[in-house]
Amino acid sequence: MHKTLQKHYMILMLPGLGLFLVLGLAFALNLVSPGWFVLSSRVYVIVFVAAVMTAIAGPIFLRTLFAHSVRARHHVDAADFLKFQRRLLQVSQTTVYLAVAAVWFSFPRFYAAAIVLMGLYAMYYYYPSRQRIDFDKKIFRVT
């Protein structure tokens, strides 16, 4: 199961990470200059809040919702658990794309740094390692 989740993780994460690296290279080679796009300060706050929601609040909410939905069961089907884990990855890896947007649109340093850190946190914390998946399977009593 963790191999399937790792593949799904890579499919979700690699395009965003690639965009981030290409954009960083474009800035380094002066192919793109900061400040081409001027956005309202409200957009910075909205994207920052969206990054917090997708990196921290959304996954916690999904985990709580899943735990609540299976609380009365003695065992959880592997298919249901896999569906939950995929949804968790989809929500958390959205943060990587918000980090790309923060860099592309030259957000102020505070917002850009915070959003990029949220993206790194989401990439690290929600990586589907064997240990994390086995631990979650034990918690949710997956058969």
Image: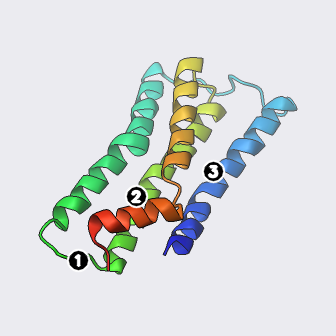
Q: How many numbered marks does the figure carry?
A: 3
Q: Position of residue 129 (x, y in %)?
A: 53, 61
Q: Position of residue 83 (x, y in %)?
A: 37, 71
Return the residue nearer the eye: 67 or 137.
Answer: 137
Residue type at the position of mark 2: Leu
Residue type at the position of mark 1: His
Q: Please identify the quarter of the rendering in which residue 75 is found.
A: bottom left
Residue pictured at 51% horizontal, 70% vertical: 2
Q: Please identify the quarter of the rendering in which residue 141 is found.
A: bottom left
**Circle number at residue 104:** none
Q: Which residue is mark 1?
A: 75
Q: Position of residue 106 (x, y in %)?
A: 63, 26
Q: Earlier in the sequence, mark 1 or mark 3?
A: 3
Q: Residues within 10 Å of mark 3 (few under 14, many from 20)?
A: many
**Circle number at residue 88:** 2
Q: Earlier in the sequence, mark 3 or mark 2?
A: 3
Return the residue nearer the eye: 116 or 100.
Answer: 116
Q: Looking at the image, is 22 positioned above or below residue 106?
A: below
Q: Which residue is mark 3?
A: 16
Q: Please identify the quarter of the rendering in which residue 39 is found.
A: top right
Q: Earlier in the sequence, mark 1 or mark 2?
A: 1
Residue pictured at 61% horizontal, 62% vertical: 10
Return the residue nearer the eye: 114 or 49.
Answer: 114
